[in-house]
Amino acid sequence: MTPLEQSRHLATAIPGPRSQQLIDRKAAAVSRGVGTTMPVYAARAQGGIVEDVDGNRLIDLGSGIAVTTIGNAAPRVVEAVGAQTAQFTHTCFMVTPYEGYVAVAEALNRLTPGDGEKRSALFNSGSEAVENAIKIARSYTHKSAVVSFDHAYHGRTNLTMALTAKVMPYKHGFGPFAPEIYRAPLSYPFRDAEFGKELATDGALAARRAIDVIDKQVGADNLAAVIIEPIQGEGGFIVPAEGFLPTLLEWCRANDVVFIADEVQTGFARTGRMFACEHEGIEPDLIVTAKGIADGMPLSAVTGRVEIMDSPHVSGLGGTYGGNPVACAAALATIETIESENMVDRAAAIERLMKDRLGRLQAEDDRIGDVRGRGAMIAVELVEPGTTEPDAALAKALAAGAHAAGVIVLTCGTYGNVLRFLPPLAISDELLVEGLDVLALLLADL
Ligand SMILES: *Cc1c(COP(=O)(O)O)cnc(C)c1O
């Protein structure tokens, strides 16, 4: 592997001529429904840098949406994937099983919150794992309703579209959606403040508001599961007020409702703990993982208490590719990298650096309504000065400016007004600071 220089470099305008050719070929060959964020095509990526086909080197503050958490093409992963492909690429775990799958399940059972006996099952995508968590919860409780939250994102398959809140672009024109899905109000401190300081800071109060809706509109006797992202991803990196998650979990336990934590975006050291649930000291019944689990190889999982995970009948769960051996080898190498290189601590250090810099920006710029998030999952919510009125146009302009300057950033949020940062943990402080400097300059210019 030739090392890729870890510096930002613009060799051409963005997009350069070779990317432009590919943009034209894409338009003629790929469904319009598949959108792209960056106007450049990738050629190589390592650590905190993505190099495009014109030789531009971009600072990666997106990690392919929180996937290459330990760094692009992390060395242990590259080696493990190479070694596994040389042995075999697929046999199907349901036909001729192999050790890697079992080893990943053992690692997940060990790493996820909770000391009790656990089991895991492996799948391909986050959406597929969410669907399976719901199947398992229904099988265990013999009930059918599921509650998800305002601003939630759980995927793009039929059941997960129903769980996802935002209509555009995720659901528009794609219904009808799966039945028996209900929505409850979230704890969204920045916006709850409009309804009083108490609701914004008292998570238990916000949880009681949600539980009241669930009680009156669904009923615990019909409810199989409550599913929630401990920190919302696509919804805008919303960190619920302290006490929100524990109060919900307590209610679920008392009412025979399975509490599912969707840690697809927050898992694997991203938030400065191995799993975001640890920040609130909760032990979910089921935990769904994907994205950061295997440094980009498609893999996802459901992990949980043995009596819940073992409730489906034999062969009730599975899939042709689920727990593919190459993806499992990548996951084991990813976990080894996180543990041996103290990447959980690295994420916490990134939080301090980013919150310090962005906090100072916020102090002098009242278009930054909120700076929030945990670890290497940090966002700024942009608003009309001095209000909570979302400014999506500013978020869009900032992202476009950053892209043209060679910095990969993403937007998110129900109102499209949140700029989010998901740097790989292997990124240097220098690159991180440079990326934020580019943003500060753009903010000053706009
Ligand atoms: C990305 C994401 C999903 C869906 O994962 P896919 O692999 O894209 O299917 C589900 N939940 C959360 C919280 C996510 O961020």
Image: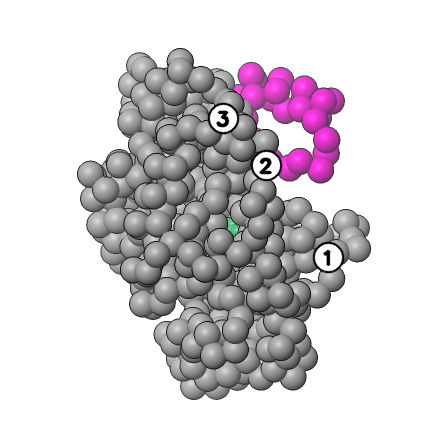
Residue 295, given in percent of the width and then of the height, sits at 39, 34
307 on left or right of 106 = right
How far is mark 1 from mark 3, CA to CA? 34 Å
Residue found farthest to the front: 314
Q: Which mark is residue 96?
A: 3
Identity of the amino acid at label 2?
Answer: Gly
Front one among 237 and 58: 237
Name the residue that disc number 2 marks: 319
Residue 423 among magenta residues: no
Ligand 1 under 8 Å from disc 2 Cβ: no
* Label 1: which secondary element: loop
Name the residue that disc number 1 marks: 178
How far is mark 2 from mark 1, CA to CA? 21 Å
Marks 2 and 3, the one that precedes in the sequence: 3
* Label 3: which secondary element: loop
Dot 2 alpha-carbon crowd within 10 angstroms: few under 14, some 14 to 19, many 20 or more:
some
